Image: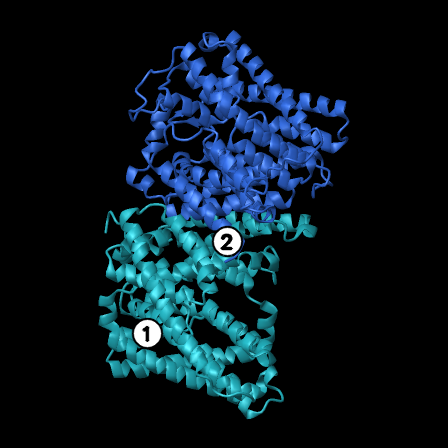
Chain colours: A cyan, B blue
Amino acid sequence: MSSAAAGSKGFGTRAVQALALVVTFFLLFAATRLTPQLRGQLGTVAGFGFLLLAGTLLSELLETIGLPHLSGYLLAGIIGGPDLLELVDHHTVEQLSPVNTLALSLIALAGGAELKLSTLREVAKSLSYAMFTQTVVVGVVMTAALFFLGRFVPFFAGLHAGPMFGIALLWGVLCITRSPSACMGILAQTRAKGPVATFALAFIMSSDIVVVVLVAVAMMLARPLISGSGGFSLHAVSELGHELLGSIAFGTTLGLALAAYLKLVGRGLLLVLLAMGFALTDFLRYVKIDATLAFLVAGFVVQNLTAQGPKLLHAIEQTGSFVFVVFFANAGAHLNVPLLQKFWPIALTLCVIRALATYVAARISSRFAGDEPMLVRWGWSSLVSQAGLALGLAITISTAFPGVGDGFRSLAIAAVAINEMIGPVLFKFALDRAGETRREEAEISRTSLLPPAQA
Amino acid sequence: VSGGIAVLLGLLVVAFVSSMLVGGRTIRGFGLPSGAEYLVLGVAVGPHGLGLVPRSTADGFEPIVVCGAAWLALVAGLGYFIVGQRRVRFVRAVTGILGAAFVGTLVAVALFLTLDALGISGGFPRLELALGAGFVGSETTRHTVRWVAERHGARGPLSDWLADMARASALVPVVGLGILFAIAPDAPLGAFAVWWRVAVTLGIGVVMGLVAAVLLGREFRRDESWGILLGTSLLAAGVATRLGLAAVATLFAMGLTLSVVSRHRLEIKFMVQPTEKPVLLPVVIVVGSCVDFDTLPQLWLLVGVALAARLVAEFMRGALLAAFLPAARAAGPRVGLGMASSGAISLALAFTFSARLPGPASSTVLLLAATGVLLGEFIGPAELRRALERAGETHAFDAASDVAPLSLPSPALQDADSELPERTVVSDFPEGR
């Protein structure tokens, strides 16, 4: 739903939406209270419908106060989720995880397809400076922050400096991750065009590769520090190399196949995307290929090596229109409110430090790269959001280091929850202030998103 | 890669192929009208055939199939009042509903008496089996009439009558299933009266239909419309299922409500209609793989009685039509046998029934639905063609031409046509959804 369309909606429309939202909540509320013993029985269907409808309606209503749609989706999930109204229970949240898989694959595919070589060349200088500065500054500052704030962190109690540093190092790397989904969600809603939007897209999508490498290296370095045994092994580096090269090779092949399909058949794209999102992701996981990277490369190949990019983006936009709503609403329902209540002081402190470090790093890199003023002022705003990628890494790390895993994961979930809620609001605010979401521009779809007939 | 994902991929491929078929002009007269070939495919790959889809995997798809069945009911509800591009006439619709109720009642009574005579089971299971068989045996698939008319170039009053009656007949099994679910002894809303449960079944659909109509009423934007339509329908289906009520009846009521109150009824119909085949065919395949041939003793006797009762009932319906309807006089009583084709709606309802009330009775109903589809495929189209020939309505137009026989626009619908979005907008809806 574009801002432009939403802007034309008057009081009557909003009143109708509010009433529909009340009916939606009431219906599921009544059903769950009438049959509490049947919790989990085909609740997935009702949960899916509720998250989709409530997310859509709440996002529309929150738009009147300038909040991004994404916040509405998240809020619908939080309110209806297991920790508040329990309209969507834990079982349903878990059952809806295939939607997350599908959404992430679509986001990666769209992210790659949005990256044009010409655009990358334009921002190459800014991008390389920013990538280096953000990685170093945020990584170092956050490592130091957790290390020195260790006495306020419950699971640090009784640990020596070595293990503490190892955990802090992992935390530093975790903080480098951004949220491609939040970035794409905001850009899809606002259809923003301009240096801030372009930079955000290019940075966040390409940082995925950097993060994958850094996590592997950090885990390799942290293992002897935390466990106190074993040494550095190059085997992990070799595995990582295989995974990266395999992902790029597979992604290239997939991209070319997809382009051929788009050119020769061009129909039934929804089902093709569904098959890719569900089955192919499962297959890639089985053969140990990074699905996100592979889809990212596939999208990039379709956009830059063939003429089918607009068609692919159009299909993803159509498919993703409701998949993304459920994805973010489910993320909201997944949010662990009790954990957030427990960890919020230290998590909030760490989030503030991370945001400051991101801002400082952006100013430094912009100065060296000679960025234009708007990018200097708002370029950092998109880098605050964190979501699924960070949570995925937290789970990987907690599994690899079971001794501190639970505590680390809990802190990560609390911090990501805060960034997940604040980041999109900040990014949309920045895009508005930078004038990249102006109404007259929003009326016109991005060229890359236009249907083939109009492109 | 898990077996479930492999099967899901297989179903997606089927849906993909069917969307391809639906998208082109080749669909006219293509394949069998009831989709019996996909049913046979399902049986072939199921545990009673090649065993490619084990029972446990098929069971895993139960929620998807139940949702698919509910979606089909929504599509049927949305298009309930419209055949091609003209409205269904009220008298014909009432005749179709009464006819279907008559056939269903006769099948149910025959089966009930047979069960009584055999002393197979008592109490609710007997009623369950008899009513279930009656409901799934009452439907005439609307695709048969259209298929025969298009394949043989039929056009005329009898064709229109039969098309309208077939469409209207869907109401009986859908509402009947709603009643059957409401009277089930283990209903979660057991504290409430049966009529109240039936009212809730339909009421949820009506309320969500109104919500969808109001939300879609202001403006009709494709991306918003899909979100609203999917959200309302899945919420309605999920809530109904949770309450132990028939989601198919709920979504049918929702579709009917939308088709009555929404000013965008035609856009919505055109939007969801292309989704019917891609949903229907995987549903039929899964249903085929779930058909159980070893449910009750003397099973084949019951199947024989049910099918014979249906044919007798159809013949009697045909006799009544020939007696009272001038357009059917030349066709004779055997025109009723042309209405013996049931299709995916019956199968989907039977599957929903067996999922909600698992046991020998509902499994038998599923088997009855499957055999009914197969028998109807052999008898229905052939008898219908002969009846239309006798009525002098075949070869009224060139079947190869683009003119659809059952789509003559009435003056009322010509007005409604002006509401249609431009062709580019219609074609812009995602394929296969």
Residue underneath mark 1: A379
Question: What's the amino acid at mark 2?
Answer: Ile
Are the numbered discs 1 and 2 placed on the same chain, yes or no? Answer: no
Residue underneath mark 2: B5
Mark 1 in CB contact with mark 2 (< 8 angstroms): no
Measured as percent of width and height from the top left, residue B5 is found at: 50, 53
Q: Going by the image, does B77 lie left or right of A9?
A: right
Above or below residue A408? Residue B57 is above
Question: Which of label 1 and label 2 is nearer to you?
Answer: 2
Q: Is residue B196 visible?
A: no
Above or below residue B86? Residue A125 is below
Above or below residue A357? Residue B21 is above
Measured as percent of width and height from the top left, residue B76 is found at: 48, 33
Q: Residue at x 71, y 31 (%)?
A: B297
Question: What's the amino acid at mark 1?
Answer: Gly
Measured as percent of width and height from the top left, residue B220 is found at: 38, 43
Q: Is residue A43 visible?
A: yes
Q: Residue at x 61, y 34 (%)?
A: B366
* A343 or A295: nearer the viewer: A295
Measured as percent of width and height from the top left, residue B204 is found at: 58, 40
Label 2 marks a residue whose chain is: B
Residue B115 found in image quarter = top right
Residue B327 found in image quarter = top left
Q: CA distance from mark 1 to mark 2?
A: 41 Å
Secondary element type, mark 2: helix
Residue furthest out toward the front: B50
